[in-house]
Structures are given as structure tokens and as C-alpha cells.
Image: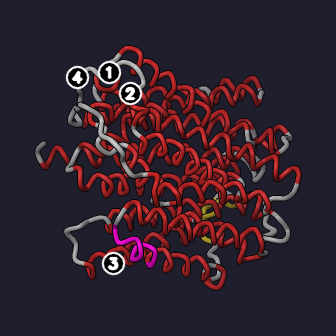
Amino acid sequence: MRQHSKLTALISLVSLFFTWGFITVMNDILVNTFQNLFHLSPTQRSLVQMSFFGAFFIVSLIYFLISSLSGKDPINKIGYNNGMIISLIITGIGCFSFYPAATFNSYGTFLAALFILATGVTLLQICSNPYAAIIGPPETASSRLNLAQGFNSLGTTIGPIVGTLLIYQIFSDGIPTIESVSKTYLIYGFVFVAMAMLVKLAKMPSFSNNESITAGFTIFKQRHLVLGIIAIFFYVGSEVSVGTWIVELIKHKDIGGLPENEASYYLSYFWGGLMIGRLMASQSLKSDLAPVKKYLSMFVIAILVFVFIYFATAIKYIDGQFSLHLLALKDVYLYAFYIALSIFAFFIGQSKPARSLVVFSIVNIVLLSTAMFSKGHLAMWSVLGSGLFFSIGWSNIFTLAIKDLGKYTSQGSSLLVMAIVGGAALPWIQSHIIQSFNIQTSYIVPVIGLLYITYYGWKGHQQLKQLKQ
């Protein structure tokens, strides 16, 4: 592929990662918005994530069964870029569905709209993740995926800010309404349709594969893939569990004691941490960079993104005009310390995906355990700082799990995307612990997930046999 084509493909691809990150993190806003609109318990609120991530399981399962029983992979046949266009249109339809859902004034109808939206995002992930891996040399696949995931995290960082402004302030007077939700998602629907048109016009290089795969379940003989599926389940489940209940934690009188519309802004520090980590990882995994240049570039990236988050979360819309309300620097020093710790963790990981996965998971276990047994700023910022150490999980697990799958790559990708259902299961489990005990105790759920991810990075990723192509 020509260099110009590679650049066009990469720019278009990172734009897609941005948009689905943006729309996915909106679930964390909806979890709290729907509580006010429909007076829901924690378990009922967790159905937001259940509907969204449940679609990942159902759609990916259908995709896998079609490919495994017919011996033909749908994405291999139609091409990755055509698959992306179709996925974006379906996602847009899901966003538009919020308008009739608002008309019915029904929580269940909103959940159905979310399911449609998530169907498009599921297909987009099945197409986009392997596309990022195959548009360049295999040895730099993890670096490209981390870069794309960095832009995904830019979407998850900006999403809570834009969502809070639109739903809580611009389209309402501080109290969210059904109309403010539907108007917000109408805007998002037009964005996804526009993205589909842009991908079509960009003429991204088309990858397709006319080879038939062996009908049946041969792919399950790959131990590193099977254990990787479980790792993705726990990774996404743990990450989404933390993000889903951050506002609930910060609202607690012993932690932050903040009102909901202020607490929502702090979501950007958690999801922004993933952006910092992923962008640093894209530099860390570049073998052609000298160590000094590598760590200097990582430091600069961390500072710039932190400054961006610091100012972006200060934007408020009050009395019909925008203004800045900056946090005191003494309130964010712990976050700055965790950023420095993440750079040290990259140094210990030595740019090796499996080793880095172990190091980052262990640090996250310590952070979430600290949040469980402390109060105030330490508990709050330890949870927010955990985003820095969730950052490399998806890309490192994904690339380790699909390694050497060849023509089975799309099929393996569909199984890994199916495992995103962990984002439905673990927040639901956590909601029951919140109801029975308290918010801090509930963080035992992501800690357990991180213990398994540590195992996968240590031993579980090792290949025992290679598929015949």
C-alpha cells in the first residue's frame, strides 16, 4: 500500500475510534440521567450498560455462527471499509431512535434504542480493530492499535463534557429532561451519518479475503485466543464497572460530596487517563525511537493531555454563556503523581505487550484497593487515576489474542468483540453489591477482573499451536 493511502486510512480509522468512544461513554451520563427521569435503583440503572454491551454479545455471536457454520467470513467478503460504512449508518439509526423513545416516555424504549445503536458499534469494532492491525507491518500492529485507541479515549474524554453540557445545561436548566436527551442524540445521529459519508469519500484502501475458512469451531483450539476472550470479558467489564459508578462514588459524602452535574465532569479524568496511557503506549512500542526520545515524547504527551483535560473540564454553561471554573492545583496533585507513576510503569514494561499488561494490572489492583479502604481525595483520585492503567489493556490483549490467526483473524475478532459483554455483566454484579453493601465495597468486582488479566499477561497469552492457513 502506498504511503499516502496508509496515512488516509489511518486518519479515517482514528476518526472512527474517536466517534465510537464518544458515544460509548455517554452511557455513563445516561446511567445517572435516567435515574432522575425514571427514579431507578442501581440495578435498574445498570440495564443501560446491559442493553448496550449485551448487543456486543448477541451481534458478535450471530456473526461468529454465520462465519463458522458457512465457512465464509462476512467481513472478508464485503471488505473492511464497506463494513465500516454499514456499521456507522446503523449506529446513526440507533441515535435517531432516541427521538421516538422520548415520545413514548418509556425507559424500555430508550434501552431498545441503545441496543440498535450498540449493534452498529459492535460491527464497527469487528471491522476496525483488525483493520488497524493489517494496514501496516505486523510488528507495529500494537503501536497502531494503541494510537487508534488513544483517539478512542479522546472521544471518551470529551464525551462526558459535551454530554453534560448538552443534557444538563444547554438543552435544560440544570435538571435533565427527556427532551434534552433526545435532542442530544439527534445531533449524534447526524454525526454518525456524516462519518459514513466521509469514509465513503475518503476511499480507504479495501482489504478483503476470498479464502474460505474451515467450517466448524477449529479456532477454539487456539488457547491464547480462548483465554484472550476471557481476558477481554474481564478487561471491558472492569473498566466499564469503574466508569459506570464513578459519579455515584464522587457524590458520596465521605468521598467527594459533589452534586451530580459537577461530579459528571470528573468522568473525563478517568477516561482521559486512558487517552494519556494509550498515546504514550503508541510511542513506547516504537522500536525505532531512541530511549531518551521515547520517554521525552511520552512525558510531553502526558503533560499536554493533562492540561487539555484540566481546562476542558473547567468549561461551564451558566446563564446562557460559557465560562471557566478551574480546579485548584492542590486538588489534582494526586492525579499528576499517578501520571508520573504510569510513565515509570511503561519503563518497567520495557515496551513488551504482555509484560506491560502485568505491570499495569498490578498497579490498578493497588489503586482500586486503595479506593476501597480510604476516603476523601485519596479514594476519589485513586479511582480516577485507574484510567491511566486501564489504558493499554484492550490493545495489548487484542493483539496478543489474534496473533498468527491469519484468515481466521476476523472470526477471532468477532469472538473478542463478543466478550465485550463483560461491560454488561460486571456493572450489573457491582450494582447488587452497591445495593447490599456500599459503593466502595463494590470495587472488589473490577479487582477480581484485574487479577485474571494479570494472569493472561503472565502466562495465558502464550501460544501452544498455530492454525493451518
Q: Quadrant of the N terminus?
A: top left
Query: What's drawn in magenta, residue-wise?
Result: 344-351
Left or right of residue 203: residue 170: right
User: Residue at position x 29%, y 45% from top?
Assistant: 133
Q: Residue furthest bottom?
A: 330
Quarter residue 372 falls in: bottom right
Callout 2–callout 1 Cβ contact below 8 Å = yes
Checking the image for residue 218, the label placed there is: 2
Distance from Cα at disc 2 to Cα at disc 1: 7 Å
Distance from Cα at disc 1 to Cα at disc 3: 45 Å
User: Residue at position x 56%, y 31% from top?
Assistant: 57
Q: How many marks?
A: 4
The mark nearer the N terminus, 1 or 3, is 1
Mark 1 vs mark 4: give the one in front: 1
> Is residue 437 shown to the viewer in this render?
yes
Magenta region includes residue 346: yes
Disc 2, SS: helix
Looking at the rendered structure, the kind of residue marked 3 is Tyr
Q: Nearer the viewer, residue 184 or 44?
A: 44
Checking the image for residue 167, the label placed there is: none
Dot 3, how many residues are within 10 Å of its Cα: few (below 14), some (14-19), or many (20+)? Answer: some
Checking the image for residue 211, the label placed there is: 4
Q: Nearer the viewer, residue 254 or 350?
A: 350
Left or right of residue 11: residue 160: right
> Is residue 153 shown to the viewer in this render?
no
Looking at the image, residue 196 lies above or below residue 153 = above
Looking at the rendered structure, the kind of residue marked 2 is Thr
Give percent across and percent down for residue 439.
Answer: 80, 59
Dot 4, how many residues are within 10 Å of its Cα: few (below 14), some (14-19), or many (20+)? Answer: some
Checking the image for residue 295, the label placed there is: 3
Magenta region includes residue 355: no
